[in-house]
Image (spheres, rainbow, N blue to C red):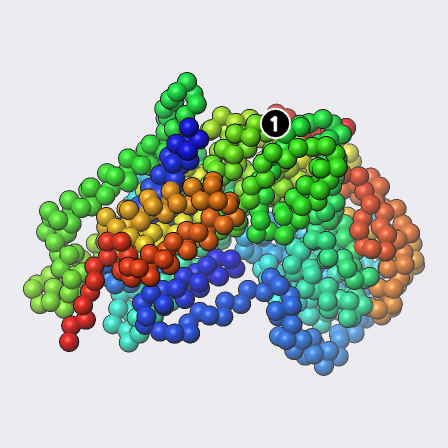
Amino acid sequence: MSFLIYLINGLSLGSIYAIIALGYTMVYGIAKMLNFAHGDFIMVGCYVIFTICSTLSGNTLVGILAAIVLCTLLGITTEKVAYKPLRGAASPLAVLITAIGVSYFLENLALLIFGADIKSFSSVVSWSGLSFAGGELKIQGVTIVTILSSIVILIVLQLFIHKTKEGQAMLAVAEDKGAAMLMGINVNKTITLTFAIGSALAAVAGALLCSAYPSLSPYLGAMPGIKAFVAAVFGGIGSIPGAMIGGLVLGIVEILSRTYISSQLADAIVFGILIVVLLVKPTGLLGKVIQEKV
Amino acid sequence: MRKFKSVMSVVAATALFAGTLAGCGGSSNTSDAPATEESKAEETTEAAEGEAPAANSGATFKIGSIGPLTGGAAAYGNAVVNSVELAVAEINAAGGINGYQVEMKGEDDELNAEKSVNAYNSLKDWGMQFLVGATTSACSLAVSDYTHEDNMFQLTPSASAADCVSYDNVFRVCFSDPNQGLASAQYIAGHSLGTKIAVIYDSSDPYSSGVYQTFAQEAANQGLEIVSAEAFTADSKTDFSVQLQKAKDAEADLLFLPIYYTEASLILTQANTMGYAPTFFGVDGMDGILTVENFDTSLAEGLMLLTPFAADATDDLTVNYVKNYSDKYGETPNQFGADAYDAVYVIKQCLEEAGATPDMSVSDLCDVMKSTIVKITAKGLTSDVMTWDASGEPNKEPKAVVIQNGAYVSVE
């Protein structure tokens, strides 16, 4: 029975990693850049929900919607101001370092506005969950909502990418930016759209992350962001189903190794597995091998 | 800083994955360990020694204070520096020390040992004679190398790691980590609070693991059974489902949490959602749990902690301090502030006892303080009776408080 509880906890943690990883992987796949500020978009989303729901005692749904809208705007602005001017820069590192700069900027801004003290987040899920086997096995409402949300998001994203014109444009830009431009695709608009979707996902991930682990601090997005990045690489960066699988595997491995091996070594094991996977399959589980064209 | 390290490591990792560059981000120099920064810090000292130290006019006593005023631990550093300021203002209003006014200056170290040494040097240039700081263990440890060299009297309010007071010129107001573990085990056994004990501690934090280690040793002596001892690290401190489930499976009736309230508030929330309700017992890092914004304080009901200071205590000294502090800074002071406030008054008491004057040299003042502090018996916010011995450790009784109806209530 305990094993089942641990497995469900792992699934729940993994689903959150998966949603964050989806944002990472989409942006990487299309804009070919690692948005290290992604974790901090999550933090911004959390603070928006917190401010609306707890400070202004507004409706939870309004809070989530506002977070999605604000994160989307933040994503678009960041892309326009900080990333787009550097897209043509000689070194691909320039934009990477800028992303780290944006990350620090957002953290320090939050520190300035909200202070260093942690705040407790009220769960956006009021449902208490299901109870099985006479109360022995309790699954929390937020766990179920998290797992379901990640599945829904995956399906919607897949449909969007494969069935809509904008999605097709994204695929084309991911494949070959230059050729896509020649075919009349507005590459800049497509990249902006990708950032918008990725940032909206960050807001959703934030709502779920803080509902499961209700502690709000300006640094809350940093570690989940990095773990989700690992999940994205593990699943094959650029691949949407890969990010999902990577996130789930990472969450489950983390919880199970903490349970059965050592609570201190869990992170070492998670990252160890990453190294092994990358050694065996350098592109990640579902990553595409890109052949260098001459 | 930790974030910085993580990001840099990912940058380094990314560089490897992408194979686009080599040698980027290799030198993430966090300076928690003072030893690693020796060479750099030495330069700083030499530079400072090269200039003539700002001569004190002899008209005022000058007290400096160092703490993290920005960043993740800003709550601690601000409490310390604000409380020093408050105490100094009170002393000046009441006529100063031996008839001399007191000046104070606070410097930010951003929780970084190297910056703490820089802050110390700039305070020295200002003419500091006594240091109330640094606020945190790693920084205090780094600074003490220099105060020892200069023979500057250092009274740290809150650096609790065991070796912070290893020099003869360094004393502290708070309990050391080992003493807290010891006292907790004795208190739990003495009051029969539980027999099967589970512990969740932060293995990446010297404070938390230091308390845990002495607790575990003393628990064995006291006949307490530790049925589950699980760790977490700074990089994975949001999910405690595993640690709690193990404690529950081991049927622990008391959960000892030698950690900060930040993580403790999450543990209480997660324990509640999984329906696990042992007695929770914490140490001074738990102080502050009721101030977490939006935290459901009913979850902390019955939580016990050993702490030297409770802001809702009703003695005159505490009531005045809390009132003046909240009037001036708009928030309720914490234990760090109380320690710093006591530190200033301890310095005052020593100077009055010895009849010292501000025109004495820093080193002479330090010698006076060293020989006087071991003789005095101080009364302060954090204890009614405080004495020191030459080791630098305070002798005072730990107080236990329990949270009832959303407030700290002293347990006698």
Residue at disc 1, secondary structure: loop
Query: So how many labels did they put on this image?
Result: 1
**Could you tell whether A172 is left or right of B292 in the image?**
left
**Could you tell whether A244 is left or right of B262 in the image?**
left
The residue beneath circle 1 is B253
Q: Residue at x 35, y 43 (%)?
A: A14
- Tell me where residue A15 appears, x and y as whole percent: 33, 41
Tag 1: amino acid? Asp
Q: Residue at x 76, y 53 (%)?
A: B172
**Could you tell whether B380 is left or right of A90 in the image?**
right
Image quadrant in which the C terminus of chain B is located: top right
Q: Residue at x 58, y 65 (%)?
A: B31
- Tell me where residue B155 appears, x and y as whole percent: 77, 56
Q: Is residue A163 visible in this depiction of the protein?
A: yes
Chain under numbered label 1: B
What is the quadrant of residue A89 in the picture?
bottom left
Viewer-side residue, A212 vs B185: B185
Residue found at the far left of this picture: A183
Q: Is residue A208 visible in this depiction of the protein?
A: no
- Tell me where residue A51 appears, x and y as whole percent: 42, 40
Viewer-side residue, A17 vs B387: A17
Residue found at the far bottom of this picture: B50
- Tell me where residue A276 appears, x and y as whole percent: 36, 57
Q: Residue at x 24, y 57 (%)?
A: A287
